[in-house]
């Protein structure tokens, strides 16, 4: 597959071995700038760094002196966080499902079509997933203060981090036997308030923007510069429907070798195929929410619904939701349990998922915008 001819190579180049350069694409440039030069705000309607939460670039900045550059540091942070996330996912699955099922569930995460964001891509998804899993595991072991402290990393990692706060609070209520009847539960303990510490990441980020630019919600406003303006066009996915309608024409032009720097048929065709795949995966995840509730309870249902629902409402065309589903680990576990009961279907899905992972990773490395 040839490299995307229309991909604009970052002016900073790549500071690591050329073999790893394929992991540094698109949003990686924003994270790299933040890790090197800090946050800037370009004004209303202008794409700027304040759209990106600080947990991941701070880790890049901390590791850069050791590895000789922020970009290489970003790859290392993702690799380590991805490995931690995989280990924690297995531990969580073993606690909830038993060791045998946990090993059966693990490949659902490892071979998920967008799992390359755990393997080295300079994006913050691996850090977020590791923090979310760590927070829930701490609370499962009845350590609410530790859960809240770990949750700070999650809420400082992505806007959807508020889902971790919601999930921790509901899981705590569940563990205190206050669901479904809050009047008949066990008494709270002072330490239980520790789960609310998880708000610290989001609160700190909002306070920073308020002090520096006078607007604690600036990160929300900046999203409009990426075409994610709240409103009916976004809520009803009109942009998505328009792109699906145009897909046959783009694909025909791409296969015929036609196109210009303005039309970019290959880019548009690959992009649209990607958002259709992500829409299908999101629909499947929504359908699995009932199974999440049945297997894992109200806390994980609340977390999963929020971690899917927040970006679903805010996305104009499903782009990015494929990798966001990595954070919905209870949904992946529920899917793994159902597939474990159907060996042929499980093998079919794992084969399909692995092929999609290979294809999408290749497109990503060749600089196509696939998530």
Image: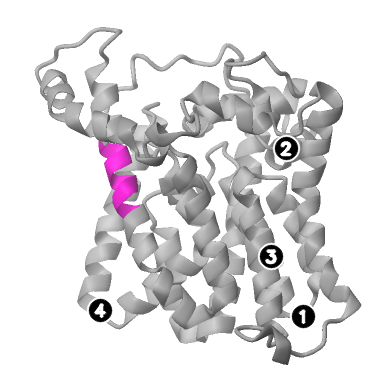
What is the chief secondary structure element of the magenta stretch? helix
Gap in Å between the C-alphas at discs 2 and 3? 19 Å
Where is residue 260 shown, x and y percent of the image? 24, 7
Residue at image coords 30%, 63%: 350
- In contact (CB < 8 Å): disc 2 and disc 3: no
Residue at image coords 29%, 46%: 277
Start-end of magenta stretch: 273-281
Against 176, is 346 above or below? Answer: above
Q: Earlier in the sequence, mark 2 or mark 1?
A: 2
Residue at image coords 70%, 50%: 155
Q: Earlier in the sequence, mark 4 or mark 3?
A: 3
Gap in Å between the C-alphas at discs 4 and 3? 30 Å
Q: Earlier in the sequence, mark 2 or mark 3?
A: 2
Determine which residue is flagged by label 2: 54
Where is residue 161 shown, x and y percent of the image? 64, 51
Q: Tag 1, which secondary structure?
A: loop
Gap in Å between the C-alphas at discs 4 and 1? 35 Å
Gap in Å between the C-alphas at discs 2 and 4? 42 Å
Determine which residue is flagged by label 3: 134
Q: The C terminus is located in which quarter?
A: top left
- In contact (CB < 8 Å): disc 4 and disc 3: no
Label 4 CA crowd tier, 10 Å (few <14, some 14–19, many 20+): few
């Amino acid at each position: 597959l040839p490299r995307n001819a229309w991909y604009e190579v970052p002016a900073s180049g790549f500071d690591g071995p050329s073999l790893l350069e394929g992991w540094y694409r698109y949003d990686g440039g924003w994270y790299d700038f933040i890790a090197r030069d800090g946050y800037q705000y370009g004004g209303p309607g202008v794409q700027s760094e304040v759209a990106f939460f600080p947990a991941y670039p701070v880790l890049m900045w901390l590791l850069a002196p050791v590895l000789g550059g922020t970009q290489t540091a970003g790859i290392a942070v993702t690799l380590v966080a991805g490995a931690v996330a995989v280990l924690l996912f297995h531990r969580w699955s073993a606690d909830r499902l038993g060791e045998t099922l946990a090993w059966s569930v693990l490949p659902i995460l490892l071979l998920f079509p967008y799992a390359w964001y755990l393997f080295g891509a300079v994006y913050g998804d691996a850090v977020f997933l590791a923090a979310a899993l760590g927070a829930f595991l701490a609370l499962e072991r009845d350590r609410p203060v530790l859960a809240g402290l770990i949750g700070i990393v999650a809420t400082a990692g992505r806007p959807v981090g508020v889902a971790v706060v919601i999930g921790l609070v509901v899981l705590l209520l569940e563990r205190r036997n206050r669901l479904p009847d809050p009047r008949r539960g066990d008494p709270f303990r002072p330490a239980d308030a520790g789960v609310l510490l998880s708000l610290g990441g989001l609160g700190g980020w909002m306070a920073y923007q308020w002090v520096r630019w006078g607007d604690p919600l600036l990160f929300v406003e900046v999203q409009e510069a990426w075409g994610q303006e709240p409103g009916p066009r976004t809520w009803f996915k009109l942009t998505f429907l328009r792109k699906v309608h145009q897909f046959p024409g783009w694909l025909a032009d791409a296969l015929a070798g036609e196109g210009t720097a303005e039309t970019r048929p290959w880019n548009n065709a690959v992009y649209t195929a990607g958002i259709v795949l992500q829409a299908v995966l999101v629909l499947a995840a929504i359908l699995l929410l009932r199974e999440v509730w049945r297997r894992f309870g109200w806390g994980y249902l609340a977390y999963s619904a929020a971690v899917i629902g927040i970006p679903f409402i805010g996305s104009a065309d499903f782009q990015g939701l494929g990798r966001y589903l990595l954070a919905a680990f209870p949904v992946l576990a529920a899917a793994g349990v159902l597939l474990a009961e159907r060996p042929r279907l499980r093998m079919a899905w794992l084969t399909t998922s692995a092929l999609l992972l290979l294809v999408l990773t290749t497109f990503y490395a060749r600089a196509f915008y696939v998530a």
